[in-house]
Image (tube, rainbow, N blue to C red):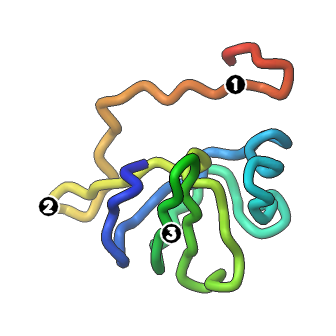
Amino acid sequence: MNINSEPGTMVKYLGTTDDQVRWASHDDPRGFLNIGQLYVVDHIDIHSWHSEVYLVGFEDKDFNSVCFEEVKEDKNGREEQSKLRTVRINDSGAVR
């Protein structure tokens, strides 16, 4: 996702790994969010080596920004397909 996204931006939760949660001691979204579901950005804190995403309804939880992709809607309100390929890396470092 774009770490400079404005509040109100819609994002899709992609899932996470243990390493992504451990990095900078982020909150674990697996107990709160559903993969593929859309959420709204409340705000983003940008640091030198990571960024923390806070979502509407989960303002007290900081999630790793790599767990999300920005979602754009077409004029009919349908989700547009991302033009970027999302690459997921599992805990052993393998691309899946």
Q: Amino acid at mark 2?
A: Lys
Q: Secondary structure at mark 3?
A: strand
Q: For residue 95, what is the image quadrant?
A: top right
Q: Which mark is residue 45?
A: 3
Residue at screen point 47% across, 69% down: 44
Task: Indicate the secondary structure of the residue bearing disc 2.
Answer: loop
For the C terminus, the image quarter is top right
Q: Measuring from the top left, give residue 43's x and y in whole percent.
A: 46, 76
Q: Label 1 is placed on what type of residue?
A: Ile
Q: CA distance from mark 3 to mark 1?
A: 24 Å
Q: Is residue 38 left or right of residue 61?
A: left
- Quadrant position of residue 82: top left
Q: Is residue 64 left or right of residue 5?
A: right
User: Is there a contact, CB below 8 Å, between mark 2 and mark 3?
Assistant: no
Kind of residue sitting beneath label 3: Asp
Question: In the rendering, at what x and y percent does residue 25 appear?
Answer: 80, 59
Of badges 3 and 1, the one in the foreground is 3
Residue that appears at 64% across and 55% down: 64
Q: Which residue is mark 1?
A: 89
